[in-house]
Image (tube, grey):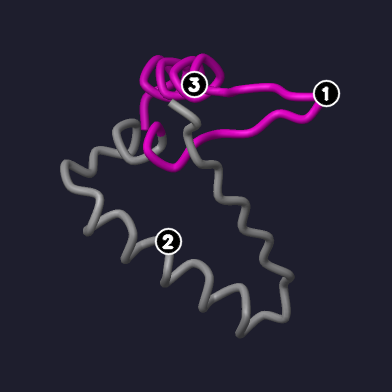
């Protein structure tokens, strides 16, 4: 991958970051767009596969669901 493409992607991910109490995080819906998934259902399948891979590797999974109060 070309260096300029990597730099653009890095910038896009950094711009999408949120911070609360000194903790940096990303919202799944934002990552969905950055990673090129048009539909949530397709991206949620990727998330489920990643969770399964973590379980199989004995890696702890922490899922925080943020709900809008609006």
Residue at screen point 50% across, 41% down: 67
Alpha-carbon neighbours of circle 3 within 10 Å: few (<14), some, or many (≥20)? some
Mark closer to the chain start, 3 or 1: 3
Rendered position, 68 above or below 17: below
Mark 1 → mark 2, Cα distance in angstroms: 25 Å
Q: In the displayed image of the protein, which residue is found farthest to the bottom?
A: 56
- Label 1, secondary structure: give it: loop
Residue at screen point 40% across, 15% down: 4
Near-viewer residue (13 or 69): 69
Near-viewer residue (42 or 12): 42
Rendered position, 37 above or below 33: below
Residue 64 image point, x, y percent: 62, 51
Question: Which residue bears the numbered disc 3?
Answer: 16
Question: Which residue bears the numbered disc 1?
Answer: 22
Give the position of the N terminus as an image quadrant: top left
- Label 3, secondary structure: give it: helix
Magenta stretch, residue numbers: 1-30
Residue 51 image point, x, y percent: 53, 70
Left or right: residue 3 versus residue 36 is right
Alpha-carbon neighbours of circle 2 within 10 Å: few (<14), some, or many (≥20)? few
Residue at screen point 31% across, 66% down: 45
Mark 2 → mark 3, Cα distance in angstroms: 18 Å
Residue 17 image point, x, y percent: 57, 23
Question: Which residue bears the numbered disc 2?
Answer: 47
Mark 3 → mark 1, Cα distance in angstroms: 16 Å
Near-viewer residue (28 or 11): 28
Mark closer to the chain start, 1 or 2: 1
């Amino acid at each position: 991958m070309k260096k300029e493409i990597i730099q653009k992607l890095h910038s896009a991910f950094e711009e999408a970051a949120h911070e609360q109490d000194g903790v940096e995080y990303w919202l799944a819906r934002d990552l969905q767009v950055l990673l090129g998934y048009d539909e949530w259902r397709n991206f949620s399948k990727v998330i489920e596969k990643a969770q399964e891979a973590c379980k199989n590797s004995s890696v702890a999974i922490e899922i925080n669901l943020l709900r809008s109060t609006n």
